Amino acid sequence: MVSVTPAQRGTFEPSSTVSRYLQPIDEMFMFLNYLALRLKQHDLADRFGVHQSTVSRFITTWSNFLYAVLGSVRIWMAVEKIREHLPAEFKDYADTTVILDCTELRCQCPSSPLLQSEVFSVYKSHCTLKGLLGVAPHGAVTFISPLYAGSISDKQIMRESGILSLLRPGMAIMVDRGFLVGDFVPCKIYRPPFLSGRSQMPVGEVRETQAIARLRVHVERLPLRLFGNINQLYTVACLLTNYENGPLVKAWTKKQGSTSAGLF
């Protein structure tokens, strides 16, 4: 809002109620709105009565702060702890330690053809950033890789992300059929079978594919509604899911009741 008086002879004097200060709890609430609701910075500036530059500064500050605080908490779980909270749906895959899948976040295409080729994802037909996520059978996020250029393969991201250093013989991972990593992963792999030139799968393989698909959906349901390409924002969004009320397995949630909220 701008007010003009005759004495100013054409000069402008801002008369605005816009503030440059918020309580820390309100700053964090603004950041969570930005992260969860995909609100634009100018929209948040209007809602909270601050300048847009202040919104940008708050987002940067809180993403870095929560990245440091939440990132200092070890999220990789011991095998014994996973067995303790194993949902009944995993009884046939009781040695599963982590469910792995890649997620791709759309990003603006660079003007450079060379950079475009690096971040262009054939799978998504768009420029993306790609990360590897790991989720325990009961729904807790236990592994988050950095973001890589969208052209990276699933096999290469498995090698570079650091997940291999956490896997041991006696463990098992659950992956999609596109993860052809059996030649270097040091543990058992649960993966839906391929047709391999057959006209149809045997009944046993069909049932196994359906069972693994139902269990793998935990990692694909993570609410990664992101709009940035900054590793801090991506990591914080993933880590915050561990502080939601309860796991993603509905049947297990009903069985455990109120105790499920205390896992994380």
Image: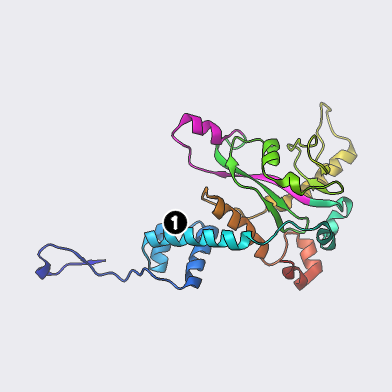
Q: x%, y% of residue 6?
A: 10, 69
The residue at 28%/69% (across/down) is 16
Question: Residue 52 is drawn in which quadrant?
Answer: bottom left
Q: Is residue 190 left or right of residue 159?
A: right
Q: Which residue is mark 1?
A: 40
Q: Label 1: state its secondary structure.
A: loop
Looking at the rendered structure, the number of numbered marks drawn on it comes to 1
- View extreme (top): residue: 197
Check the picture and name the quadrant holding the N terminus.
Answer: bottom left
Is residue 55 found inside the magenta-colored segment of the image?
Answer: no
- Measured along the vertical axis of the image, is residue 80 above or below residue 154? below
Compared across the picture, whether 1 is left or right of 195 comes to left
- Please provide percent x and percent y for residue 72: 64, 61
Magenta stretch encompasses residue 107: yes
- How crowded pointer 1 is (Cα within 10 Å; few <14, some 14-19, many 20+) is rated as few
In this picture, residue 143 sits left or right of residue 229 = right
- Pick whichever, 79 or 139, lies toward us: 79
**Screen quadrant of the C terminus:** bottom right
Magenta region, residue range: 98-122
Q: Give the image location of residue 83, x and y in percent.
A: 84, 59
Give the amino acid at mark 1: Lys
Q: Residue at x 80, y 58 (%)?
A: 78
Vertical comparison of 121 with 241: above or below:
above
Residue 21: give x, y in percent of width and height. 39, 70
Q: Quadrant of residue 148?
A: top right
Residue at 56% across / 40% down in the picture?
A: 128
Asked if 100 appears above or below 1 in the picture, the reply is above
